[in-house]
Image: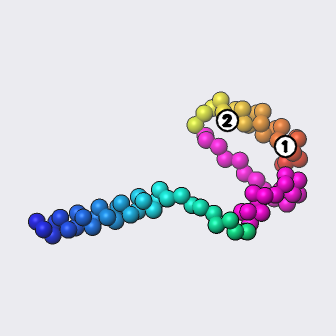
Amino acid sequence: MRRSKAWTGWIFIVIFSIVLAGCSQYKSTGGSGPDQDFLNAKWEQLTEQAKGQTVNLYMWGGSDSINKYIDEWAAPRLKKNRMLR
């Protein structure tokens, strides 16, 4: 009986640790890296760097009306106005 309680305690500690680690927030150290460059860049810089690259738009696929809006209204306008293929 005592051994069973010990294992139960260890299992609880391990599960609690995993949950706690999964719920912790990532905090930036304020360093300078590609992410910081991206966040601080001007729109013109981003569009210049993106030329010739592929951008994928992924959305929730569960709504026929939203899919129709994206396929028939938003995507054609993005292609026309932003010189996308």
In what element is the residue under mark 2? helix
Specify the quadrant that holds the N terminus: bottom left
In what element is the residue under mark 1? helix
User: So how many labels did they put on this image?
Assistant: 2
Q: Position of residue 79 (x, y in %)?
A: 84, 43
Q: Residues within 10 Å of mark 2 (few under 14, many from 20)?
A: some
Residue situated in front as seen by the camera: 57 or 49: 49
**Residue 25 horizontal side relative to residue 18, left or right:** right
The span picked out in magenta is 34-61
Residue situated in front as seen by the camera: 45 or 50: 45
Residue at position x 60%, y 33% in the image: 63
**Residue 71 horizontal side relative to residue 25, left or right:** right
Q: On the image, which quarter does residue 12 sit in?
A: bottom left
Confirm whether residue 50 shows in the render.
no
Distance CA(mark 1)–CA(mark 2): 16 Å
Q: Residues within 10 Å of mark 1 (few under 14, many from 20)?
A: few
Residue at position x 73%, y 37% in the image: 71
The mark found on residue 55 in the picture is none
Residue under pointer 1: 79
Amino acid beneath label 2: Asn
Q: On the image, which quarter does residue 20 sit in?
A: bottom left
**Residue 72 horizontal side relative to residue 23, left or right:** right
Q: Return the residue found at the far top.
A: 65
Q: On the image, which quarter does residue 62 sit in?
A: top right
Confirm whether residue 32 shows in the render.
yes
Amino acid beneath label 1: Lys
Residue at position x 82%, y 41% in the image: 78
User: Is residue 56 covered in magenta?
Assistant: yes
Residue situated in front as seen by the camera: 21 or 56: 21
Residue under pointer 2: 67
Residue at position x 84%, y 52% in the image: 43
Q: Position of residue 85 (x, y in %)?
A: 84, 48
